[in-house]
Amino acid sequence: PHDGHWCANRELINNPRCFDLFDKFVFVSNWQKEKYIMQFSPDLPTEKCTVIKNSIVPIPKHVKPKDGKIRLYYASSPPRGLSLLVPAFEKLVSERDDDVELHVFSGFSMYSKTGERISEDEEYHELYDRISKHPKMKYYGSVSNDELREHIQNMHILAYPSNFQETSCIVAIEAMSGGCLAVVPDSCALHE
């Protein structure tokens, strides 16, 4: 029967009988589409696949501060590279004059309305303290998207050494919309 429930199982989606139940398979990046087909459905007809990339409400036009400071920022959950960025930034600061600073918008409360993930912040308590105590770093914790978008207007560079397999990256899209240079690894969908 044409009942999509039997196709929900990962092993069954590779069954060509499932392909006819769907008009399109929609992905948020070319990388995600290619990875999905390679891992789960090598026989998935490419004519049934389409990519509709993520989008955002553009950040309003603005003028960046010109006070001689280069403002880098990180805005994601801590395991997406924050522990790589902090020592790299400390090294950068040791080799530069007094013209660079790092603003960190990170924490788990942004992912949970009920608070169940806030306990995961404990694992990063020492890293948050290290950031907070450094004179060239400022730790904000989790902030709303509206607040982050306001801060982006005063930033110059998104420093995002993500070590996750990103299927798409709203953080990078918002950074570029806000006129920031996005420094990211050339992996997964980040280069898109």
Image (spheres, rainbow, N blue to C red):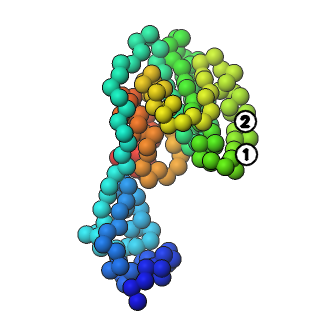
Q: Residue at x 29, y 70 (%)?
A: 48
Q: If you read the primary sequence from the N terminus, does the residue marked by circle 1 or circle 2 appear first? A: 1
Horizontal arrangement in the rendering, residue 60 relative to residue 109 (left or right): left
Q: Give the left or right position of residue 47, taking residue 33 as reference.
A: left
Q: Quadrant of the N terminus?
A: bottom left
Mark 1 residue element: helix
* Picture quadrant where residue 7 is located: bottom left
Distance (Cα) linking label 1 and label 2: 10 Å
Compared with 185, 168 (above or below) is below
**Residue 62 visible somewhere in the drawing:** yes
On residue 160, which mark appears?
Answer: none
Q: Quadrant of residue 79?
A: top right
Residue 126 position in % (x across, y down): 73, 33
In the depicted view, which residue is nearer to us: 2 or 176?
Answer: 2
Q: Specify whether residue 15 is in view.
A: no
For disc 2, the marked residue is: 125
Q: Is residue 89 above or below residue 121?
A: above
Dot 1 alpha-carbon crowd within 10 angstroms: few under 14, some 14 to 19, many 20 or more: few
Q: Residue furthest bottom?
A: 1
Mark 2, other Cα within 10 Å: few <14 / some 14–19 / many ≥20: few
- Residue type at tag 1: Ser
Disc 2 marks a residue whose amino acid type is His
Give the residue drawn at x 44%, y 71%: 40
Secondary structure state at the residue bearing disc 2: helix
Question: 97 and 33: which one is in front?
Answer: 33
* Left or right of 7 on screen, residue 144: right
x%, y% of residue 9? 51, 77
Residue 119 - label: 1
